[in-house]
Every structure is written in C-alpha cells, then in structure tokens.
Image (cartoon, helix red, strand yellow):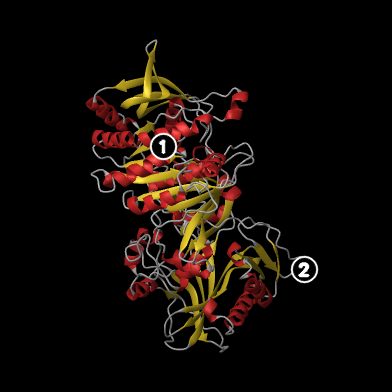
Amino acid sequence: MPVHRIATLDYLSEYALGDRPPPQRRHVRLDVDRALLLNYEHFRFCSYGWRHARILEHRLGSPLNEGVWPINNSRCEFRLGSPGSALFPKGADLESVPPDVHVAALRGRILCYFRAISADEAIAFANEQLDFRHATQITSDWYDPINGDIECSDAAPQICGSHAVPLAEFDYGTSRFKFSNSWGGKWGDLGWGSLSLEHYNRFIIESWAIGARGVSVPRIANDGVICQEWKWSVSDEIGVHGREIVDARSGMKLAWAFCVKRRNTLDVEEFFVWPSERHKGYGRELARMILALAAQLGRRIRLLVSFADTYEWNIGESSAVARLLRVQLRESDLRCVHLIGEAREAPFNMTRERPQRPAFMLESLRRGNEQPITEPTRYEVLFGTNREMTVSDGQISFTGRRGDGLVYGWATVEIPRSCRFGSAGRWYQWFCKKQFPSITNTVVCNSREVFAARAQSCVSAIQVHDDVQNVLYIHGYNVPFQNAITQAAQFGVDLKVPGRMFAFSWPSLGVVPGYAADEATIEVSIDVLREFIELIMDCTERTPLSIIVHSMGNRAAVRVLEMIGEGRIANCIKHVIFAAPDVDAQRFRAAVGIFRTVPKSATLYATRGDWAVQLSEVIHVYPRAGLFPPILVEAGIDTVAVSGFNLLDIGHGYYAEAAPVLHDMFNIIHHGARPDVRPRLERITHQPDSHYWSLPLR
C-alpha cells in the first residue's frame, strides 16, 4: 500500500500580493501529521471531496451515480481537505455533518496534484508509491475478470462506461499495474486487479497523482493575501513547481497553479482560481509568476487543459487563462488532455468528443456483453403450481387447466451453450435453428420435509457472491409451464441468484386467445400463491426472498402482498420487482398504500412500447400500471420508465431479455441499490414533489 514520504520543499518564497521583492528562497522541511499518513486508507474512499466537486461542476441535483472529474475532486481536497471516512462515512451529505467536521477536513488537505501523461510517468509514480488515481474507459473485460486481471479488449470494443482506480504498483515481470477496486472484496482477487500497459495507453482518460496528504506549505505572514512560490521534488525525475495565492489569516487557498518540466517545455498542468475569488486580479498574478518561472528556466509554456475545463460554463475561463499565459489553444494530440495551449498559431475547434466522466459502477459482477457459455448448464428450479398434472410414459407434465390445489417439486433445466445474457429464446431465432433452454427432468414432491431439504441442500453448491437470498419468479399471461420454468432458470443464471430460484406457475392456457380465461384463473390462484410463499419461508428457515413478477401475474402478487402486510412472513420479503404489470393503475395505487412497508424496496418497470399491456388497456378502457403515458408515480415504489426497443422486440418480454433492465435488476437484488446510485438511470421530475426514473435500452 502507498506510504507517503516526509515532504521536503526545494525552495520557498513568500510575499504580499502586489509586492515585487527579489525572491528570497529557502529550503524547508515540512512538519507532517504522522497520524494522517498512517491512516492513508482512512481517506481513500472518503466522498467528502467528491460531494464538493459536484457543486463545483454545477451538478448538485444530478443523479448520484454520476461521477466527477478527478481534477475537480483534487481541487476540492486541495482547498477544503478531507475528514476521512470515519467523520464523513459513505452516504453522508454536506448538509448533515456538524461544523467541526469541516474544520477537521482542513487537516487532511493535499500538498499538490499533477498528471501522468504517459505510461512511463505512470510507472514512475507507482514506483514512488504516490497516491495515484487512474481514470479509464471500461469495456466488458472489467466484469468478472479472472483474478481481477483486465485484458485488452478486441479491435473494436464496446465502451461500457468509465471508472477511476488507484494504481498501487507496477510489476515489471508481467508489465501490469496493480490496483484496488472500490467495487468491493467480492470482485477480482479480494478486491484487487491489474491492467496491462496496452490497456493503460489505449483507454486512459486521465491519470493524476496526489502530493502528501496532511501537508501544507508553511506561512510566515499571519494576515493579508500572500503569494507563495515553491518546488517539491518527489524524486530526481519528478518535481512540481507550485504557485499559490493564500489568505494568510485563514490559510484558505484562493488561487493556485502547478507546473512540471518536460523536455523543453514547462507544462502548466493546473491553473485555477476558486469561483468565489474570481475577478480580483488573482489570475493575472498567477500568470505573472508562471511567466517569470518559464523565463528563469528557459522553457516555453505549454498549457494542458483538462476535460473538466471544456464545458460551456467554464471554457471561457480556460480561454482567459490561455490569453494570460500568451498561448493559443488547440485540440490535444494526447488522449489524457482535451486542449493544449502553445505560443504558436493554431486553429481552435472543439470537434473532439469528451469521454464520460468516471462514475460509480455497481455492476461489478455482471458482464456488460457476456459471451456464450461454452458448455450446457444445468440449473435447478423449485416450483409450485396449481395446474393439472399429467403423467405419460413416466414423464410428468402440466397442462393449462386448473388442478386441485398446490403441487410442488423441482425441475432441472438445461441451458444450451448458445444462449447469451438475457436470451431465453425469441420467435425469430427459430428460423436460425438456435437451441433454447429445456426441461430435462421434473420431480413432484408430496412431502414438505423432502421439499425443505431440497431447498436448503443446494445453496452451499451455488457460487454465492452476496448474503444468501432466494428469488421467486411469477409469470404472466400466455405462458405454458415449461416456459415459466425455463425463464426462471434463465433468471437464475443471468442474475446469479445468491440462493435458490423458485417459480410459481399458475394455470395460464398458454395461448393468445386465452386472455379472458387467464384473467379468471389468476384470481383463483391468489390463495395458492400465498400458500406457496409460506411454504418457501417455512422450508428455507426465513431466508430473505425477492420476487420478480410479470404482467398478469402482478394481479395475484399485489393481492398476496396486501394479505401478508401484517403476517408473519412480511419481514422476509426483501425486494419486489413489478415488471410490466397488467393491473389497473388505480387498483395498483391503492395496493401500494397497503403493502409499501412489506418489502425493503419495490420497483415498477413500465414502458410505452408493450403491445400486450396496450391491448389490455384497450380492453379495460382504464390505464394500466405497466404502461405510460400516464406514468404511475406513487410514494413507496420506484418507477422506472423503459424505452428504446429494437424493431424485432415484441415488447412484452423486455424485462427478461434487455440487458440494461437485467443489469438494473441485478443491482437491486445483489446490492439493494437505490435508483439514484444505479447506473443508466436518469431522474425525471414528474411534478414539483415527485419523480420517476428513465432507463433507455439503447
């Protein structure tokens, strides 16, 4: 793990703003708060600077899953510091912490920050054990990598997003950087991973090293606005020239610049005046100090403009800095820099696309573009049904007619190697002679004890990444028994269910003209569904249960949730996902008011492109909960509007086959993640006091 050295300044000069004395430089050894250095991990994942950076980026109301640019996080930690994760724990906000936390944060300020513009510099930073954070584009290689080793993707990879990780060391034997990932200990090698030099160069966004934390340049003056000039050498190859304008009384940083010598240039990597301190002449004074430094060193100035400084609300400031330093901006030929300013004629344009800012990623165990499985997979689903059972040649099957009561057992499903993530089989794929999941064995159980033993026996055999929880799938209209079971198995594989996968299959006729009959049957299946849920709870010793329910199946699920609102199993319901509910919207609102305290979270997926629910709305005249407009927004439930179907998507099965929806469901089940921290979701204001979430499929 990185351990900071005791910082030593090569020189230091200080004078009052406006004075022009000959610089009287002195060698200074800084006093370091060793307690801060010893608690380095205490600061690594503290979000204090990140919260302030959101304000700096004018994005205070944006979704929390959106990241910030690394340079803005460093700017906030340079001026405001960081109190560490103990005083500012995960999930805290700036308004809720007491004033003494902000005072404590000042003790955790950083000395400076500087770039790595090449892999060679990154290796040098790692060798010097600097706190070095690398922002990179991520591909599907980042999902479930073996031992956390990120391989370089193919020639035209799909970019899944971006991420930032601290690079801890470089292994010359393998030519790979080692890093710790904020996705947790269940990712990679106990939370650690590695990436190659090729990946570093190919997908870099920005890389920044941070100077010693808990260290500030000492001051002589104790009043007024002062200018400070200093240099800090990390090693013989790495050194930073700092220029600061400081309020001597409070010690608050008002404006600052950091410069690095490279070949025949003096690279101005940072030039920043805090927004509240602008238009006071500080920028001109910074520029004067930098021009004097460049003249003293005999080097030409090169201004490096970060991606964060090219938005419409601050590109004017970047242009003003270029004028002060007497350089002209042009698009950069470096991947990690957006614009470069040099003292030569150059056309100015902004055609280069800005990469996505590094963001929080919670899909750490789900592949973004999962490849086909290489061998057929056998997956067991425990089921309950009130269908009519038939036996032919020793083979058990279930019809679309009603049976005499609850029948339960288990079925083995073979998922062929051709199945991709979310692919349970589409109508047009039959023409391609694709293989689809199929039931290879069905067992009916007449003993609750045997069923309980089966429900508990396989949990230890499943690769569990999270605390054990079971999932129950309830299908909708026009679904035969075999389709219900194979879809449940596909959910078990796609969502990596950390426990047992259950399915309740009510007697749908399994034909399109059977809508009216299915409506009648779902009503008489309510008590049987409740009996099956109680059986699951009894047989699994109250293991938490999440429920995924689709279409017409929501009618029974909603009624059962109302019935168990005060029952003994209510506390065991973890998450409920209502997918495309074919339920009267007014009826659904009323039900939410009754069962909203039963599950820990409830999510409603609705869309405007669901042909089956559209037809139901025509038949029933009144709006359906799973269709918009109008969008159903109700306290106690997270409404997600899904949009962007492909032409060949028939719509009603989007919840099970669209990768973004499956990713979102994965984050709910595994992480219990709120919508504001789930990737891809965008908050949409519905009314002044209500909102819902948008999830585009494309």
Which residue does the numbered mark 1 point to in the structure image? 496
Quarter of the image for residue 89 reads bottom left
Residue 461, compared with residue 237, is above or below; it is above
Q: Residue furthest top?
A: 393
Query: Which labelled disc corresponds to residue 355?
Result: none
User: Which residue type carries mark 2?
Assistant: Glu
SS assignment at label 1? loop
Q: How many residues crowd mark 2 within 10 Å: few (<14), some (14–19), many (20+)?
A: few
Q: Which residue is drawn at the image coordinates 40% and 51% (left, top)?
A: 673
Task: Say above or below: 630 vs 648.
Answer: below
Q: Earlier in the sequence, mark 2 or mark 1?
A: 2
Q: Position of residue 668 (x, y in %)?
A: 41, 47
Residue 38 as seen in the image, left or right of residue 440: left
Whether residue 445 is visible: yes
For the N terminus, the image quarter is bottom left
Closer to us: 181 or 256: 181
Q: Is residue 447 left or right of residue 503?
A: left
Which residue occupies the foreground of this view, 169 or 366?
366
The answer to which quarter of the image holds residue 213 is bottom left
> What secondary structure is marked by label 2?
loop
Q: Where is mark 2, residue-wise?
A: 345
Q: Is residue 73 above or below residue 323?
A: above
Query: Picture coordinates of residue 496 (x, y %)?
Result: 41, 37
Q: Dot 1 surroundings within 10 Å: few (below 14), some, or many (20 or more)?
A: many
Q: Amino acid at mark 1?
A: Lys
Q: Are marks 2 and 1 in contact (CB under 8 Å)?
A: no
* Rendering quarter of residue 343: bottom right
Question: What is the distance, in whole Å, between disc 2 and disc 1 at their CAs?
Answer: 57 Å
**Who's the residue at 50% across and 63% down the image?**
687
Please give the count of numbered marks on the rendered protein.
2
